[in-house]
Amino acid sequence: MNRDQIEGKWTEIKGKLRETYGDLTDDDVEEAKGDREQMEGVLQQKLGASKEDVRKTVDRILEDV
């Protein structure tokens, strides 16, 4: 999924992220503003997860939307 597609489905993606990671706040999710790399960085920082784990989860979320 490219950046334009992510931005177009951002509301749905935000919901999936919040559903998957209940600890995320609206501010955490909004900080990424549709940018996948930023989104992964925010998740890594907030959750203390590995880059690989975060990337797999984001891939799975993007496949579902």
Image: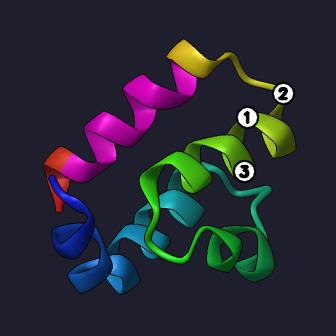
**Marks 3 and 2 close (CB-CB < 8 Å):** no
Three-letter amino acid code at the position of disc 2: Gly
Rate crowding at label 1 as few (under 14), some (14 to 19) or many (20 or more) other CA atoms within 10 Å: some
Q: Would you call the spot at circle 3 few (<14 residues within 10 Å), some (14-19), or many (20 or more)?
A: some
Location of mark 1 (residue): 44
Q: Quadrant of residue 49?
A: top right
The percent coordinates of residue 50 (x first, y second) are: 68, 16
Residue 36 placed where, x, y %?
A: 44, 53
Residue labelled with disc 2: 48
Q: Residue at x 20, y 74 (%)?
A: 4
Give the labeled residue for mark 3: 42
Find out whether the residues at labels 1 and 2 contact each other: C-beta distance under 8 Å.
yes
Which amino acid lies under the numbered mark 3 shown in the image of this protein? Answer: Val
**Residue 36 versus residue 64: which sits nearer the camera?**
36
Local crowd at mark 2 within 10 Å, few (<14), some, or many (≥20)? few
Q: Magenta part of the protein: which range?
A: 53-62
Q: Is residue 24 above or below residue 55?
A: below
Element type where label 2 sits in the image: loop
Between discs 3 and 2, the one toward the N terminus: 3
Q: Quadrant of residue 41?
A: top right
- Determine which of the numbered discs, if any, sits on residue 23 in the image: none
Q: Main secondary structure of the magenta part?
A: helix
Measured Cα–Cα span from mark 3 to mark 2:
10 Å
Query: Is 7 displayed left or right of 18 in the figure?
Result: left
- Could you tell me if the residues under marks 1 and 3 are in contact, i.e. CB atoms within 8 Å? yes
Instruction: Name the spot of residue 10 as percent of width and height, x first.
Output: 36, 79
Q: Residue at x 64, y 50 (%)?
A: 21
Q: Residue at x 76, y 68 (%)?
A: 28
